């Protein structure tokens, strides 16, 4: 056993005596910085004007606003009755809506010809 230990020590000392140096890995070639994760591009939501929301709501409710569906259309378009009056006048002036004598409003679009 003593002979094995002595032989191992001799080999170890021989390695140190021949100019063998243990390299210092601490300062050379640092690890690359992690790359940040990139989120996929998300398209921006389309923001509709009150007039566009009103036309869309009327289109989706049979192309006509009347006494039976006015609540659903106002809710869907997220507008109030005062805004409905001004938007109806604008749509009518643009030729995009017809107002009937009973207060019904019919939109004129490619969907509702």
Image (tube, rainbow, N blue to C red):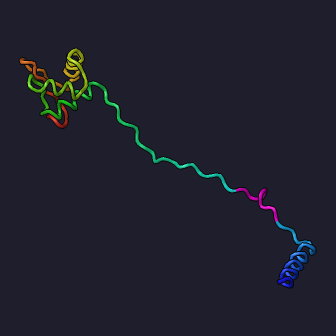
Q: Quadrant of the N terminus?
A: bottom right
Q: Residue at x 22, y 32 (%)?
A: 56
The answer to whether 62 is drawn above or below residue 33 in the figure is above
User: Does the magenta run of residues contain 54?
Assistant: no
Count of residue discs: 0
Determine the residue positioned at 40% across, 38% down.
Answer: 44
Q: Quadrant of the C terminus?
A: top left
Q: Give the vertical position of 92 relative to 2 (above or below).
A: above
User: Which picture quadrant has residue 77?
Assistant: top left
- Image: 76 above or below 6: above
Quadrant in the picture for residue 72:
top left
Q: Give 103 or 97, whichever is nearer the viewer.
A: 103
* Residue sitting at the far right: 17
Residue 105 in the image: state x and y as whole percent. 13, 23
Would you say the magenta stretch is mainly helix, strand or loop?
loop
Left or right: 53 in relation to 65: right
The residue most toward the front is 1
What's drawn in magenta, residue-wise? 23-30
Q: Tell which of 45 and 52 is nearer to you.
A: 45
- Name which residue lies at 14% across and 32% down: 63
**Residue 58 x %, y %:** 17, 30
Q: Is residue 102 left or right of residue 7?
A: left
Q: Is residue 81 left or right of residue 48?
A: left
Q: Quadrant of residue 87?
A: top left
The extreme left residue here reads 102
Q: Nearer the viewer, residue 76 or 111?
A: 76
The answer to if 28 sits in the magenta stretch is yes
Q: Is residue 85 above or below residue 24?
A: above
Q: Position of residue 99 (x, y in %)?
A: 12, 20
Q: Could you tell me residue 4's position as x and y percent?
A: 83, 83
């Amino acid at each position: 056993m003593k002979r094995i230990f002595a032989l191992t020590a001799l080999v170890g000392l021989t390695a140190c005596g021949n100019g063998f140096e243990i390299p210092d890995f601490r300062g050379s070639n640092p690890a690359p910085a992690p790359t940040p994760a990139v989120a996929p591009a998300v398209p921006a939501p389309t923001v509709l004007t009150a007039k566009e929301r009103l036309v869309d709501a009327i289109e989706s409710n049979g192309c006509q606003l009347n006494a039976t569906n006015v609540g659903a259309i106002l809710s869907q378009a997220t507008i109030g009755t005062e805004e409905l009056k001004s938007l109806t006048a604008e749509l009518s002036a643009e030729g995009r809506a017809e107002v009937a004598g009973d207060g019904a409003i019919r939109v004129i679009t490619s969907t509702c010809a």
